[in-house]
Amino acid sequence: MGEKNDTRQSAEITRTAASTDTVYPSPLRLLLLVAASIFSVEIGYMLFLHNILSLSPFQEAVLDAATLSLLVTPALYFFIYRPLVIHIEEHKKAEEALRESEEQFRGIFDYSKVGVNVLGSDYRYMKVNRAFCDMIGYSERELLAHDFKAITHPGDVEANLRLSNKLRAGEIDFFHLEKRYLHKNGKIVWGDLSVSSVRLENGTLRYVVAIIQDMTERKQAEQSLLVAKEKAEEATRLKDKFVSLVSHDLKTPLTSMIGFLKLVRHDNTEPLNEGAKLILDRSIESGKQMISLIDDLLTISRFKTGQLELNKQFFDAKYLGIKMLAHYTHLANQKGIEVENTIPDNSRIYGDKTLLTEAVQNLVTNAIKFCKDGDRITIALADEEPSTICVRDTGPGIQPGLLKHLFDYERKTSTRGTAGETGTGFGLPLVKDIVELHGGELGMDCPPGKGCLFSLKLPHVTPKILLVDDDKNFRYLQILNLKVMKADIIEAENGEEALTMIAATRPHLIITDIKMPVMDGLNLLKSLKGMPYTKDIPVIVVSGEYGMEIRDEVFKLGADDFATKDINTDDFIPRVRRFIG
């Protein structure tokens, strides 16, 4: 039984030794395996002697000590020596990996084309590469004696220090900064700086790694472009100012000259022969063209210099069509051209009436110029687009080659009209600028031989009316009366509440009572007309009081209209339309 146990123990030690051989296939491991086998045999033999021999107590003690020694030796190997060897070899592998990593970092650090440096938590340089030294002109020894502040432009020290302190405190682990370095020769070097932190296990900052890309040439190029841009803009401003001044100074004497020519042309006291009349007519026409050119130049100058401010208001688009018919029907009829206005009544649009009139006028006169006998020009609203004004003609259209530069001020695309008319070439570019200044878009469809369609697509705006009255029922009655206006209506019970609402959303029209709690209508009117933001909002005062005194008072305070509370809708609605179309 003892022999079986010894055999199993020996086999177990042998297997263990074999397993160590697979892990450590070195000559030393083979020697250990042999030693383990010998130990197993010796242990078995000593146990055998212990069983078959009659030994004195002293001899048994010696034999037991020898057996114990053989048993302890493998234990020392497996539980002390073997783990120690494993730890040593793992440590060697880690050292090898660290050495390889350091060699890779050293290669990147030393031979990188961008600046790389390592700084301690005190911001002093611990290591800098050659690229960084070349960038700012200092040697490595000189840099290691300083911190980053010594070579940073004074104007950038604060920003760099603020970010570095955040990084040291652990608030951030990385930051990026464009900064100026001071080269040893005194010149400024622009650097694109990226900094990251390396920390201990407890979070304490160990050191930081900074990478710097030299961006001096790029900054110099940007500065050169900026200077060139500023010079070009200044030249443009001077040119526009010159054009504006010259145009204004030319217009006055030209207007006087045309007036005198007209007096001579139509002086019946001393009749002129036909030749003289023809010369005067052509002189007057040339003068008018010159004034038209000056007007266009003045408007363009206001656009370019930013002096043009829109005076937006609601008005009836039909007004534009009526005005075009009044001014240009006679000119069109001379060429056998029919002009019609199909814009319906109460066609509300929102914009600068003067500028939009000028835009439509340019389109109509352009159409008259290129149409011939039998053609038709129509001023209309687009189908299903109530804020889009259209000018359509049945003329020759536009050749494709002209379309590309049709809206360029710098390229003259104007050609003679069907009756030899000439133009400035500024009309269509000006129309485009006017529409875009309104936030709209100029549409064009001009296939050759099929006429032209120009569309002024303006943003659709719904008017907002603020009703101010402490009588809830009267406000409700006004809402019912104003439903025909298709406006958004908001309500306030007194002047103070009205001012609060106006600060949040600006109405297009205010209709207010006079007698109200907290703040009455008169004080509300004073406040509205006394503030730049609200002084141009039209105000209609509706009061239960009668008499000229109250009327005079509200008009003196700046009211735009006055009505009594016994409202007649046939009278009141047209008053409202004056302000919101």
Image (cartoon, rainbow, N blue to C red):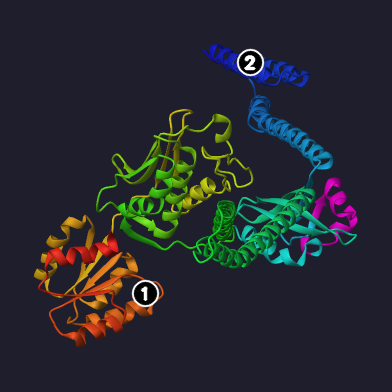
Which amino acid type is shown beneath numbered disc 2?
A: Thr
Residue 469 horizontal side relative to residue 344, left or right = left
C-alpha span from label 1 to label 2: 106 Å
Residue 86: x, y in percent? 68, 30
Which residue has dot 2 on it?
14
Q: Is residue 405 magenta?
A: no
The magenta stretch spans which residues? Answer: 126-149
556 shown above or below 355: below
Circle 2: element type:
helix
Q: Is residue 140 magenta?
A: yes
Q: Residues within 10 Å of mark 1 (few under 14, many from 20)?
A: some
Circle 1: element type:
loop
Could you tell me which residue is drawn at 28 percent across and 61 percent down?
A: 580
Residue 440 horizontal side relative to residue 523, left or right = right
Residue 546: x, y in percent? 14, 83
441 shown above or below 170: above
Residue 404 or residue 272, whichever sits in front: 272
Which residue has dot 1 on it?
535
Residue 546 horizontal side relative to residue 377, left or right = left
Q: Which mark is residue 125?
A: none
254 shown above or below 471: above
Residue 449 or residue 506, whichever sits in front: 449
Residue 498 or residue 433, whichever sits in front: 433
Q: Residue 470's quadrant in the figure?
A: bottom left
Q: Residue furthest bottom?
A: 549
Comes first in the chain, label 1 or label 2 = 2
Q: Nearer the viewer, mark 1 or mark 2?
A: 1
